[in-house]
Amino acid sequence: MSGMGDRRSISLTEGLTEMESDLSKVYAAIAKGAMRIARELPFRVGMTSSVNPSGETQAELDVFANDLFAHSLIDTGVVSEVASEEMETPMTAKSPSPRMLSVAMDPLDGSSNITTNNPLGSIFGIWRGKLPQPGRAQVAAAFVTYGPTLSLTLTRGKEVDQYIEVREGAHKDQFVRAHRAMRLPEKAEVYGIGGDRAAWTPEVKKFVEKLEARKMRLRYGGTFIGDFNQVLKRGGIFAYPMLQNKPDGKLRILYETAPISLITEYAGGTATDGRGPLLDLKPTKLAQTSPFFVGNRSLLDELRRDLSTPGSA
Ligand code: FDP
């Protein structure tokens, strides 16, 4: 992975010139929205009385982030459809066309962390044409972390770059490239597995016991994006597996796991639902969930072997 800062600081505006113009407009809208949300965060920590399509009570910030991103993405003029974890039906452009881009997003990942001041995120998968489509068909993907720093990680061709917001100096209030062509480190350091341990399948339980025996570091903060970002930087595995009472796990394919799987593959890692590549799943519903495991190839190969030999993992 490249170190902090290229020799000369590259701003996001410069980085976007290396991309197709419709995609650069989408990334610019995401960057602008992310900065706005980061500034609003301290003032919007309440809950609303409404629920999202998955039945979860919406936080004020969920609604704010959803409206902001959905409108600004449609306003780029290159996006025909925005599907979101927070909307029952997608928002569409006035004159949609199959050649235009479609965005599936989780506008605010990890809402339960709002009140505790832990990291939050936003996730975006970008396709051409109507959704749902398999993750493999994505033209690009991006995620934002709202943490000690505001970062924007995005695919550029088949590479992954990470930008951070600069708070002083010549690039004040701009995103500047901190990492170009990121790669997952070979050494796997951290792991974070969601769901009730008692509800894990015996194979998942035994796999995790092996990670523990190797003294890998447990990192589970309750925001998928925050936890995944640690895997991207430190190597390891994040999972929200199949549970005894929830065989399809919790995380949504289009809004959450497909975009992160694309980013992971471009950074040299891989992701699976426990049966095959996550990116090859063909969701038929926008909010469809699946079991999810993402991280270093070597660990995921090991997991695949353990999952395919039930009881003897
Ligand atoms: P949240 O419910 O707070 O929105 O997207 C769902 C998600 O957060 C992920 O960000 C997170 O990894 C996971 O759920 C946490 O679920 P658990 O509370 O079951 O651990």
Image: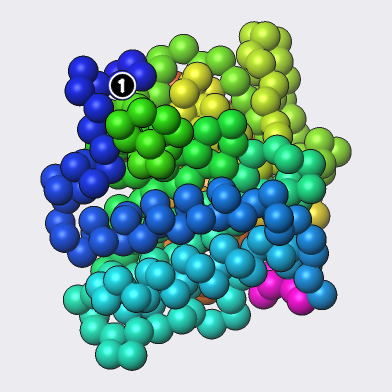
Left or right: 289 with respect to 243?
A: left
Residue 28: quarter of image = bottom left
Left or right: 16 with respect to 83?
A: left
Q: Horizontal and vertical percent for residue 10?
A: 23, 33
Q: How is the image coloured?
A: rainbow
Residue 180: quarter of image = top left
Residue at the outermost right position: 198
Q: Horizontal and vertical percent for residue 297?
A: 42, 27
Question: From this viewpoint, is residue 34 visible?
Answer: yes
Q: Nearer the viewer, residue 259 or 274?
A: 259
Q: Is residue 53 magenta-colored?
A: yes
Q: Quadrant of the C terminus?
A: top right
Residue at the outermost front position: 169
| Disc 1: which residue | 5
Q: Horizontal and vertical percent for residue 86?
A: 61, 70
SS at circle 1: loop
Identify the residue at horizontal 54%, vertical 82% (top origin): 89
Identify the residue at horizontal 36%, vertical 19% (top origin): 4
- Of helix, strand and loop, which mostly describes the magenta segment? loop
Name the kind of residue labelled 1 in the image: Gly
Identify the residue at horizontal 40%, vertical 41% (top origin): 173
The magenta segment is 50-54
Q: Is residue 293 above or below residue 43?
A: above
Q: Is residue 122 above or below residue 306?
A: below
Identify the residue at horizontal 46%, vertical 58% (top origin): 33
Q: Is residue 194 above or below residue 50?
A: above
Question: From this viewpoint, is residue 308 visible?
Answer: no
Q: Is residue 251 magenta-colored?
A: no
- Please state the total of marks drawn on the protein image: 1
Q: Nearer the viewer, residue 62 or 259?
A: 62
